[in-house]
Image (cartoon, coloured by chain):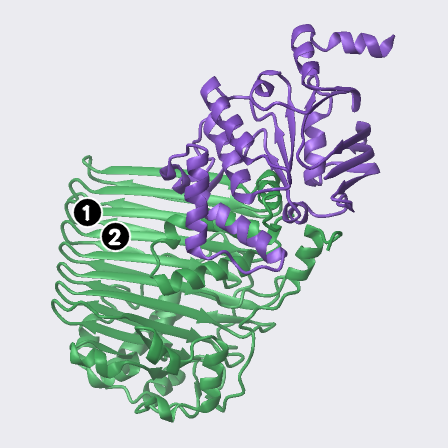
Chain colours: A purple, B green
Amino acid sequence: MLQITNLHASVEDKEILKGINLTVNAGEVHAIMGPNGAGKSTLSSIIAGNENYNVTEGEILLEGEDISELAPEERAHKGVFLSFQYPVEIPGVSVTNFMKTAINESRKANGKEEMPANEMLKLIREKSELLEIDRKFLSRSLNEGFSGGEKKRNEIFQMAMLEPKLAILDETDSGLDIDALRIVANGVNKLKNENNAVLVITHYQRLLDYIIPDFVHVLMDGKIVKSGDASLALELEEKGYDWIKQEQEA
Amino acid sequence: MAKYTEDDLKVELENKEYEYGFYTELESETFPIGLNEDIVRAISLKKEEPQWMTDWRIEAFRAWQEMIEPDWANVNYEKPDFQAISYYSAPKKADPNKTLDDVDPELLAMYKKLGISLDEQKKMNNIAMDIVVDSVSVATTFKKTLAEKGIIFMSISEAIREYPDLVQKYLGTVVPQKDNFYAALNSAVFSDGSFCYIPKGVRCPMELSTYFRINQAGTGQFERTLLIADEGSYVSYLEGCTAPSRDENQLHAAVVELIALDNAEIKYSTVQNWYPGNKEGKGGVFNFVTKRGFCEKNAKISWTQVETGSAITWKYPSVILKGDNSIGEFYSIAVTNNFQQADTGTKMIHLGKNTRSTIISKGISAGKSQNSYRGLVQIGARADNARNFSQCDSLLMGNNCGAHTFPYIESKNSSAKIEHEATTSKIGEDQVFYCNQRGIPTEKAIALIVNGFSKDVLNKLPMEFAVEAQKLLEISLEGSVG
């Protein structure tokens, strides 16, 4: 699904990613953990195509195709989805209208007709039930006046609507209380299948109690320094990141 | 596509031509340039006007000569040379007693290009249209249907001939001849425009619409609209404007007068898309317009405008709330791009008791443009319990444009309640990226954000117009974030 090779990236001449290698196969959940400032959010922004970062070396393949030169919307059309750590507000644009536009733009790019209104409504009903979202919520302006939990749930709702191949969840757990966390995680689990993959970026272990990763990677100072299975996350929770640092220096 | 950046997009769109910038080869009768009393008389004669009308024009002309072009607005431009303009131009084949079959096929082809095929209008939309090209009204549709209800909808030249009493009674009562420099000029030389009268208790069954177009080079357009809603009547009126792309500036100085008698309601919507000039700021229409309404008891006047065109806009649709319990509303979206300058807003003059007014202004600036809101809320000594709510929001794109707000409040009555809210925001890169990430290209993302910003006003437009307005916003702003 996703294959990242020797990825180097910088922002304003400061190198942030220093040679990332990562392979994610369809049907897998990968977690990327690491201390603040390790480059976790940079990695997710770069996969999504944020032009504020310069990729100086390496490649990003999605289903074998190099996407590192594509515009962010083109990557989205190919099935890349990023759940933002800080979703932005767009006043006056309802969640429904936003989703309708997004879905139809992707369909257009993939040579399909616009989604008929009845189909769209059915999809909205289905996905909002899946994520326990009150439909009144969907006529509100996108993220405007939403609580932290509502914003994150809305991100997962959008993911459900767009059915991406690769979903990147950037610090989705931050700002969530335990109930919201459970709902969001359940949503992700329900959406997961053999044909898609999830990349969870998180600082803490607690989200991983609900979304069980197949692989856990530790990102430090722009590099993946350790990989393991779900037990690695528990170990990190217990011991913190310092022991890895020491292991590295040793 | 991969390397196609916003900058490329910007370049492409800057070079994109004004869609309505064509010129139609029409045989026209155009007066020599220049302005003096003889020209004013000649216009009046040409239109076979009664003596009182000629005198009224001359009076206005003499007043105008004594007046000075105002310069308090927040706009910079080279003042037009009023002696270098022709004050009358008419497509030759326009015939006052026309039916659609008599209309010059070239004209019809032009309407088609503008997307307003009269035939189509006739059949599909429930909209009666008056079309003004250069100086004269060339076609009025639906006249018969309206006549059955006693509604008069025709060009003002016809009205002066056919209903002189009505015209004489109301013309200049809301915007007097000497009101301001451009209104005085208009009063002297107006060549056509629309006239509408809705009888007592009649609810006009369709939207009435005027379409203005400047076609001929070197001419000004000075149209005059007079709309009277008699007691307890209702009318919704639409106005649209375009002009060919020309290097020189064209002058448009219109006057619109609305009169809402007791319990009447007038809804007046404008989509103004005059040629804004090219990306270097050359050419474009100077739009100096005086629009004002007068409310008697329990009457309501609502102005809704979407202003995307013109090089310079100077326009303040206002309401005089004379009658007790009358209501004035102003909903505006003003878009400026490239070198456009707009100074627009409203005046709400509260004279009667319990009068209410609402002002919602949305200014969107891009490129190197300047966009100003200028508004006056005035509460008279006798206007007990008058209320006003104003909201002025500005949206900026890029770092080279400006948004300005000049709200004036004058209250002579301590029971008045006046609220004013203002915000300024910028379309953020993060908003655009968020949309991109969901598969929405930048151009579409901007349209979405702008439409969201303007939604409160767009919602006030009649359905047919809202769609057109939305499209216009997109065209005017494409590629302006960078």
Residue A155, given in percent of the width and then of the height, sits at 53, 35
Q: Secondary structure at mark 1?
A: loop
Residue at 25% across / 64% down in the picture?
Answer: B258
Q: Residue B282, located in which quarter of the rendered image?
A: bottom right
Q: Is residue B26 above or below residue B169?
A: below
- State the residue at coordinates (39%, 64%): B465
Relative image position of residue A122 (x, y in whole percent)? 42, 48
The reply to whether discs 1 and 2 touch (Cβ–Cβ < 8 Å) is yes
Residue A239 relative to residue A245: left or right: left
Q: Amino acid at mark 1?
A: Thr
Q: What kind of residue is marked 2?
A: Gly
Residue B48 in which image quadrant: bottom left
Return the disc, 1 or 2, that comes first in the chain's sequence.
2
Binning the other alpha carbons within 10 Å of mark 1 as few (below 14), some (14 to 19) or many (20 upward) gives many
x, y percentage for residue B200?
Answer: 12, 69
- Seen from the viewer's position, the closer of residues A93 and B341 is A93
Q: Quadrant of the N terminus of chain B?
A: bottom right
Question: On the image, which quarter does residue B238 sit in?
Answer: bottom left
In screen coordinates, is B331 left or right of B70? Answer: left
Where is mark 1, residue-wise? B355
> What mark, if any, has residue B328 been given in the picture?
2
One can see residue B154 in this view: yes
List x then y, in percent, for residue B450: 50, 49
Mark 2 packing: few (<14 Cα in 10 Å), some, or many (20+)?
many
> On what subunit does the disc labeled 2 rest?
B
Residue B316 sits above or below residue B42 on the image? above
Question: How many numbered tags mark residues here?
Answer: 2
